Amino acid sequence: MKFNNREEFLTNAGIFEFSLLVVALILGWVCSVQPTESVIFAWKPLIYGLLAALPLFVIFMAIEQLPIHSVQKVQQTVLDAMGRFLAGCNHLELALLALLAGIGEEILFRGFLMTWIESFAGYYWGLAISSLAFGLMHAVTWVYTIFATAAGFYFGFVFDITGERNLLAPIATHAFYDYLAFLVIVYEARKTQPDEPDREESEQESFEW
């Protein structure tokens, strides 16, 4: 999908992530599953979830440095698709976009799909199928699909990281990881295209480090 400016990108991205939440609630109602049942605010899963984003971020940053064409292609594809728009965002906009992604995608894939499949096929099938579905939704390239599927397994593990299932943990992990990834994309976009800011944005609205 092509976007003309930052506002259009943010609006469409926000609508998409919110639509995932709506889909999760509808599917939950149809299948008699409450996708948000395990979203319980507590400091322990929140802190565990935030900390769990760090090793995931380090691993994927390390993978991106590999001198492999297919891996470098993923990085360039993401940069080409989002770099210019994210570079025009401020910290709050990046954080809100990351939070929307964490909430919408985790409630759909872990809160609904994983939980629902577990109810009749068991934990491992729920984890595997929900992770594969998560990867397929991010099928930009086949390498990126593999990366996203692996991330899905990781988020599924974080779902139970404290010993008491709480969806707040993978939401925090997902959102914080996305925020860190957005910062990297902004940095790379500014470094590789320093003379191509979003034409419709003023300097005051652009991202500042």
Image: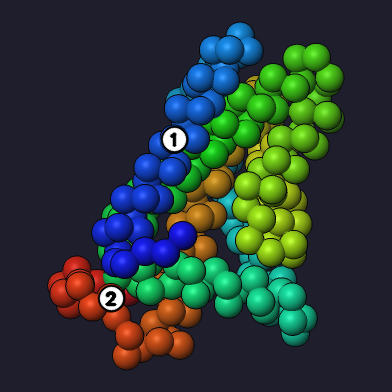
Residue 144 x %, y %: 69, 62
Q: Residue at x 29, y 80 (%)?
A: 197
Quadrant of residue 33 in the image? top right
| Mark 2 closeness class: few <14, some 14–19, many ≥20 residues within 10 Å | some
Return the residue found at the far front.
1
2 and 1 marks in contact (CB < 8 Å): no
Mark nearer the N terminus (2 vs 1): 1
Circle 1: element type: helix
Residue 60 lies, with reference to residue 30, above or below; the image says below
List the residue tagged with mark 1.
Answer: 19
> In whole angstroms, how far apart are the C-alphas of marks 2 and 1?
27 Å
| Mark 1 closeness class: few <14, some 14–19, many ≥20 residues within 10 Å | some
Residue 78 x %, y %: 54, 69
Looking at the figure, which quarter contains the C terminus?
Answer: bottom left
Q: Residue at x 54, y 54 (%)?
A: 177
Q: Nearer the viewer, residue 89 or 32?
A: 32
Q: Determine if residue 92 is in view.
A: yes
Q: Does residue 53 appear to the left or right of 161 in the view shown?
A: left
Q: Residue at x 37, y 42 (%)?
A: 15
Q: Residue at x 63, y 47 (%)?
A: 137
Residue 162 x %, y %: 65, 30
List the residue tagged with mark 2.
Answer: 198
Q: Amino acid at mark 1?
A: Ser
